[in-house]
Amino acid sequence: MSAAFNTLLYKELLRFWKVAFQTVLAPVITALLYLLIFSHVLSSHVQVYPGVSYTQFLVPGLVMMSVLQNAFANSSSSLIQSKITGNIVFVLLPPLSYAEFFLAYLAAAIVRGLVVGLGVLLVTLWFAPLRVEHPLWVAVFALLSAGVLGGLGIIAGIWAEKFDQLAAFQNFLIMPLTFLSGVFYSIHSLPDFWHRVSQWNPVFYMIDGFRYGFFGAADVAPEKSLLVAGACFMAISGLTLALLKRGYKLRH
């Protein structure tokens, strides 16, 4: 990779780490509040896997939700801020290929997502000790899913021209996909109609596959979840690279 790539990646990593109280600690506290509230309210109403308490079931879902939301937020907010303030020109001027541009933003988004996810996991383990049946599945789904939402964040940042548009993208797409993906429940506890609807949500497969790595049990086969997550990553990466190659809404 070129020096320009290394510089851009360092800039993106430093950007969120300099305000870690807001970008890392705040999401960890939010996830902890979700755990305390939902485990208290739903523990006796939601069916989970045999030998797994609801609080234990909830932890991987909250970890993955935090990974996804923060990976998306990192790349999307960075791009929209650069476009609005006009300093995007300093990113476009160096001899940086569109692939390196993509990889730098994607890598930073993945790092932020994983850092927040690890923070959530460490804090919530105090309340619900977990076993990890398949560590490799945990790592693969964490990386792949952070990549999917990091890439989607790049697309949102390229498309949006103001913060209102980015907020709409997040509120009407990202939030529903993550909250209605089995974070707080097993889809087997849903009525038949919503059970079928959930199977059309790609985020469900990311969370379900990630949860399989902890418990060795899942609502669908982990191989199917991996296939869906991998297909989403390839599709979003291809679209993002195509937009960057065209200079869509970046080069006028």
Image (cartoon, helix red, strand yellow):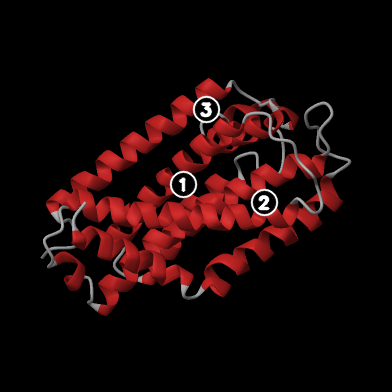
Front tag of 1 and 3: 1
Q: Residues within 10 Å of mark 3 (few under 14, many from 20)?
A: many
CA–CA distance in space, label 3 to label 2: 21 Å
Q: Is residue 164 above or below residue 97?
A: below
Q: Is residue 196 above or below residue 66?
A: above
Task: Tell me, yes or no, whether the two marked residues, 1 and 3, touch with CB atoms within 8 Å.
Answer: no
Q: Residues within 10 Å of mark 1 (few under 14, many from 20)?
A: many
Chain-order first, disc 1 or disc 2: 2
Read off the residue under disc 2.
121
Q: Residue at x 85, y 44 (%)?
A: 43
Q: Residues within 10 Å of mark 2 (few under 14, many from 20)?
A: many
Q: Which of the pair 226/159 is nearer the observer?
A: 226
Q: Name the amino acid, label 3.
A: Ser
Q: Residue furthest right?
A: 44
Q: Which of the pair 34/209 is nearer the observer?
A: 209
In x, y percent, where is residue 111?
A: 45, 55
Q: Name the amino acid, label 2.
A: Leu
Front tag of 3 and 2: 2
Label 3, secondary structure: give it.
helix
On-image quarter of the C terminus: bottom left
Label 2, secondary structure: give it.
helix
Read off the residue under disc 3.
225
Chain-order first, disc 3 or disc 2: 2
Read off the residue under disc 1.
146
Q: Name the amino acid, label 1.
A: Ala
CA–CA distance in space, label 1 to label 3: 15 Å
